Amino acid sequence: MESAININNLSVSYRNIEALRGINLNISAGKLTGMIGPNGAGKSTLLKAILGLININNGQVFYNNKALIEQRKIVAYVPQRSQIDWTYPATVWDVVMMGRITKTGWFKRFSNVSKQKALNALEKVEMTPFLNRPIGQLSGGQQQRVFLARSIAQEAEIFCFDEPFVGVDQRTEAIIFNIFHKLAESGKIVLVVNHDLGESITNFDDLILLNKELIAAGNRQEVLKQENLDQAYNGKVMFFNENDYNLAA
């Protein structure tokens, strides 16, 4: 049976203010899934609730019929860049090797195998020349690539990224999307919170459209129907229409 995250009747509140209500959703492996919606729609909240990083009012989250919160070792999570302390005295190598701790254990020496996997991950994101550079001295795009390398080195089954394309250059965006697709093609779950409704939206196979409740989920073309967007954004959104683009091309 295909691996999937199953979310059942998930609700979240902050100080009695409803953030998410009654979310029922399946997220399949083998597809690049994007989560979209207006500011304040609950995208990051849903991601954190799925991973057990915040308290929920009610609901359940399973992966392959077992509570996901009991399987955190198979999850790689990269938060928004604004939530990371870039003044922390760590090099690129230090950060990527953190991805091997779940395999090695705390306070144990990393094996040659772990070191090689970290090097391979850095090569994939084209950051090997910066191996000894402090992370605070990198550009935004380079920092995002380093944390992607860390998640690759972790060898997770579920990859979750919260707005990884904010403040990155086009080359970094292309590199990241290429890796996301390869991870999905290898049978991983790849879930990405995304704020951009421009041309980059066509990189996603499936989409989840939120505004405190689930508006639509599934195939990209189905989710991006005008009635769904109007409901989510209250009729105030401009988005990249790939059909118009294809006609113009």
Image: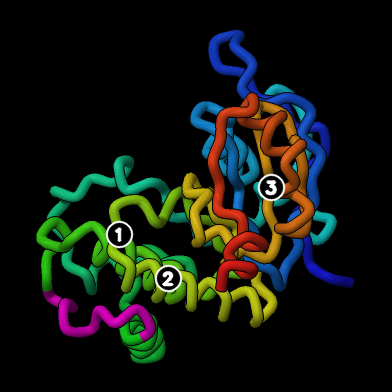
Q: Is residue 125 magenta?
A: yes
Q: Position of residue 176 (x, y in %)?
A: 42, 70
Instruction: Tell me the residue at 48%/71% (across/down).
Output: 177
Instruction: Tell me the residue at 34%/78% (across/down).
Output: 125
Relative to 133, residue 53 above or below:
above
- The answer to which of 60 and 160 lies nearer the viewer is 160
Decide if residue 86 is in sight here. yes
Residue identified by numbered label 2: 176
Residue identified by numbered label 3: 208
Q: Position of residue 135 (x, y in %)?
A: 17, 61
Q: Give the image quarter of residue 203.
A: bottom right
Task: Provide the secondary structure element on which disc 1 rests.
Answer: loop
Q: Give the image quarter of residue 235.
A: top right
Which circle's residue, 2 or 1, is located before the other in the chain? 1
Q: Is residue 92 magenta?
A: no
Amino acid type, callout 2:
Ile
Residue identified by numbered label 1: 168
